[in-house]
Amino acid sequence: MRKTLAAALCALTLLALASCGGAENPTNPSGSAFNFYFAPKGVQLVMGADPAAVLPALGEPLKTFPSPSCAINAVDTNYRYPGYVLTVTDPDKGGDYITSVQLSDDTYATAEGVYIGSGFDEVTAAYGTDYKEDNGFYTYTRGRSTLQFKITDGAVTQIVYDYLF
């Protein structure tokens, strides 16, 4: 009886933990912490995740161009879509990672509803006051990712998601 009860409790615990890792809280590749994500047209671009499954769902980019990585010794591939640029990094041929998304206009909003043109009060209402500020850039950290808002004259003028290597 005790073994059956213990097994049932373990199963319930595992089920509860598994439900925590759903689409609302994607994890980084190691699964150790929740990372920020951007979801154009419902496709989740999780910072630090493998882009192989999501790139086809995004459709054809307007432009694709390589560039040297700013973060590590690697090559970035930038995919320009209407309203944002997705950056994928291949660190020394160890596998691709989604490393950055930069919103370029108000076509899209963050998962919490903040877009370019939102007020600073909307940013803090959505993300709180646990940010680091540096010259008008307000940076929030979650897991191994950041979400940065550039605030000019009280309004969001830039939104950037980044993966922390």
Image (cartoon, rainbow, N blue to C red):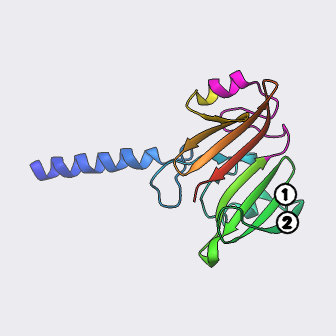
x and y percent of residue 154 in the render?
A: 78, 24
Which residue is outermost to the top? 121
Q: Amino acid at mark 2?
A: Thr
Residue 76 as seen in the image, left or right of residue 47: right
Q: Judge by depth and name the residue closer to the eye, 161 or 71.
A: 71
- When the figure is inspected, residue 28 is found, relative to residue 136, above or below; the finding is below
Secondary structure mainly formed by the magenta segment: loop
x and y percent of residue 128 in the render?
A: 58, 27
- When the figure is inspected, residue 61 is found, relative to residue 138, above or below; the finding is below
x 29%, y 50%: residue: 11
Q: Amino acid at mark 1?
A: Arg
- Mark 2–mark 1 contact, CB under 8 Å? yes
x 59%, y 55%: residue: 164
Which residue is outermost to the front? 135
The residue tagged 2 is 64
Q: Secondary structure at mark 1?
A: strand
Q: What span is colored magenta in the figure? A: 103-125
